[in-house]
Image (tube, grey):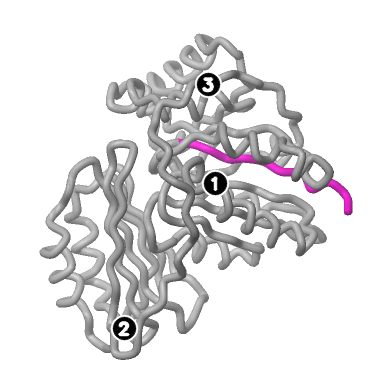
Amino acid sequence: MKKIPTNIITGFLGVGKTTTILQLLKNKPENESWAVLVNEFGEVGIDGAFLTESGAMVKEVPGGCMCCTAGLPMSVGINALLRQKPDRLIIEPTGLGHPKKILAILQSENYKNYIDLKATIGLVDPRNLSDEKYTSNQNFNDQLNISDIVVATKMDMASDYDECLFHSWVKSLLHQPKSTAIDRGELPLHWLEEDRTTDLIIEEHHHHHAEQEIVEMVLEPGQKFCRKENKGQGYVSCGWFFGAESVFDFDELFSMLSALTAERVKAVMNTNKGFYAFNVANGVVSVNLLSIDGMESKLEVIDTQLLPWDQLEGVLLSLLIEE
């Protein structure tokens, strides 16, 4: 088979990776079929539902940094997608990891005859460059230091100062990547065709857990929902998985998500107004109606500290109007 052009799109939590990939899928050539391997820190796997809506071939690696789960799960996911002979493969690592080990696997003997590794694209919200919480985070820096192209996202919410700081910051990087700024995820397709140019040696700064298998989320007979927790890289997550028969009150759900102070919240929920995707970042709740029917509801909360999960679970259960 011919080598499949492959891009890694990386970036920290809430930077807009999934939004950017969705826009790329929307604008791809009509005669091409693309595949996406998506990795999430949380256990329940939500981004896959967003991306499946676009018609792409999607495989998920949930449950933590793909660097840590990169053995069997990543290889199984890549192999399954390559067997479908896509015209392009996009890999989205979790916002709490960096792509060094992923790059090593893609460049290994196993894939050298099957993958044409193109530019790694690192996304950054320029507003974060003024916040030491991000600039002092090693994963934040590693993701961008290994990128061939650095892209400033969410420019519609950035100030002139943020944009100026972004361009100044890119010039300060030792490997001098190409850079651009985009609004609402509109990354030009031609950036995907750029060749990989960055070959930096980055030290490992976080502990790698033992490689693990992906456990599919399935409810037992009579079980209404299940809850999964995860922790690593200074963050904790809690996710809930409800059966397709569960229906939530849309207005009350929106109010609950608006009140959450967690760093990151994502959900795909079956509501009395339809099946919706909810995305909470920087205190802003965005909502999109999905055309999917009969899907399970999933919600994931990520923060730097443990939150009252039992209390949040009680609120979620109180929003159910059908079971």
Please tell me whether mark 1 sits on a helix, a strand or a loop: loop
Which amino acid is tagged 1?
A: Ala
Front residue of this view, candidates 123 and 311: 311
The quadrant where residue 200 appears: top right
Indicate which disc residue 246 carries: 2
Indicate which disc residue 202 carries: 3
Which amino acid is tagged 3?
A: Ile
User: Marks 3/2: CA distance?
Assistant: 46 Å
**Location of mark 1 (residue):** 70
Percent x, y for residue 132?
28, 21
Question: From this viewpoint, is residue 286 visible?
Answer: no
Please tell me whether mark 2 sits on a helix, a strand or a loop: loop
- Looking at the rendered image, the disc whose residue lies closer to the viewer, 3 or 2, is 3
User: Which residue is pictured at 57% across the width and 35% down the height?
Assistant: 101
- Looking at the rendered image, the disc whose residue lies closer to the viewer, 2 or 1, is 1
Which amino acid is tagged 2?
A: Ser
Percent x, y for residue 235?
28, 42
Predominant secondary structure, magenta span = strand
Span of residues in magenta: 1-11
